[in-house]
Image (tube, rainbow, N blue to C red):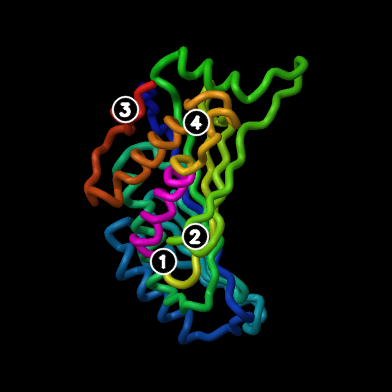
């Protein structure tokens, strides 16, 4: 059984408007007021909402940050960018999910507005043997050169767009693993489609008959099982626990 500890977690979402949105005092006021109402408890004050009218045509921007500035919202004439970076405790994991969902509600995305959604995690292994097995499976190269990890693509009847899963060495956590999941979301980002996104890589691996031959070991499947478990905690429980999450997966015994 593999046990992973989630050390860092983040979400980045870029939503692109079908056509540039011109500057409007009313639009700025509406978005700013909704943001303050929604995120006041997370530390956002009126002074923390920064509007740059630019040329008052298409060169404008609106910015605010919350949750000790770990989460930010930026709106320009072309897109809305939401970033939540480097959660380190379970309380932040759930807060990151909710910030992204709330920002989508504030902006009132329509069904025609696409978002490029990415979520990342840096995890460590409880077992040195598990760490050695996984990281060495990325390939042995000459000194000074290291091989890349795995990139997998998931297609599912229940999700319209392709989901990309990348596994590689972590550049931020010594002897850790970096995991990146990305896809496209049409329309409103909500709890339902975020839960679906986190479950799809696991279903993809379950349905891939020759996975063991492709990756030589079942370790990647175990790791993704663990990842889906730990990232899915905020969606399943809605509760916070101010400690890093360690995830033993009983049904993934070798």
Image x and y of residue 58, in percent: 65, 80
Q: Residue furthest top?
A: 129
Q: Is residue 46 magenta?
A: no
Work out whether mark 3 precedes mark 4 in sequence or the reverse, and give the earlier one: 4
Observer-nearest residue: 63 or 121?
Answer: 121
For the residues marked 4 and 1, what is the alpha-carbon distance in whole angstroms? 33 Å
**SS under mark 4:** helix
Image x and y of residue 194, in percent: 40, 57
Graded by Cα atoms within 10 Å as few (under 14), some (14 to 19) or many (20 or more), the crowding at tag 2 reads many
Marks 1 and 2: CB-CB under 8 Å? yes
Q: Is residue 239 left or right of residue 121?
A: left
For the residues marked 1 and 2, what is the alpha-carbon distance in whole angstroms? 8 Å
Q: Is residue 194 magenta?
A: yes
Image x and y of residue 43, in percent: 33, 56
**SS under mark 1:** helix
Observer-nearest residue: 230 or 93?
Answer: 230
Quarter residue 213 falls in: top right
Observer-nearest residue: 126 or 203?
Answer: 203
The span shown in magenta is 189-204
Quarter residue 166 falls in: top right
The residue carrying mark 2 is 82
Tell me the number on the disc at residue 89: none
Label 3 vs label 1, nearer the camera: 3
**SS under mark 2:** strand
Q: Is residue 240 left or right of residue 164?
A: left
Work out whether mark 4 precedes mark 1 in sequence or the reverse, and give the earlier one: 1
For the residues marked 3 and 1, what is the alpha-carbon distance in whole angstroms? 33 Å
The residue carrying mark 4 is 220
Tell me the number on the disc at residue 103: 1
């Amino acid at each position: 059984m593999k046990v992973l500890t989630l050390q860092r977690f983040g979400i980045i979402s870029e939503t692109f408007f079908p056509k540039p949105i011109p500057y409007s005092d009313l639009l700025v006021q509406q978005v700013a007021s909704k943001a303050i109402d929604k995120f006041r408890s997370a530390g956002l004050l009126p002074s923390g909402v920064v509007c740059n009218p630019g040329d008052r045509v298409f060169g404008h921007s609106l910015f605010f940050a919350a949750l000790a500035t770990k989460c930010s919202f930026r709106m320009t004439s072309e897109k809305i960018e939401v970033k939540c970076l480097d959660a380190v405790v379970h309380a932040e994991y759930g807060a990151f999910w909710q910030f992204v969902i709330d920002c989508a509600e504030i902006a009132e995305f329509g069904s025609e507005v696409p978002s490029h959604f990415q979520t990342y995690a840096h995890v460590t292994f409880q077992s040195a043997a598990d760490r050695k097995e996984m990281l060495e499976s990325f390939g042995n190269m000459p000194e000074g050169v290291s091989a890349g990890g795995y990139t997998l693509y998931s297609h599912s009847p229940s999700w319209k767009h392709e989901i990309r899963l990348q596994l590689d060495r972590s550049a931020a956590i010594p002897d850790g693993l970096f995991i990146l999941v990305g896809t496209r979301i049409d329309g409103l980002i909500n709890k339902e489609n975020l839960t679906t996104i986190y479950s799809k890589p696991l279903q993809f691996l379950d349905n891939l008959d020759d996975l063991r031959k492709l990756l030589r070991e079942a370790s990647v499947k175990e790791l993704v099982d663990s990842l889906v478990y730990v990232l899915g905690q905020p969606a399943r429980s809605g509760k916070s626990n101010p400690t890093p999450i360690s995830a033993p997966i009983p049904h993934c015994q070798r």
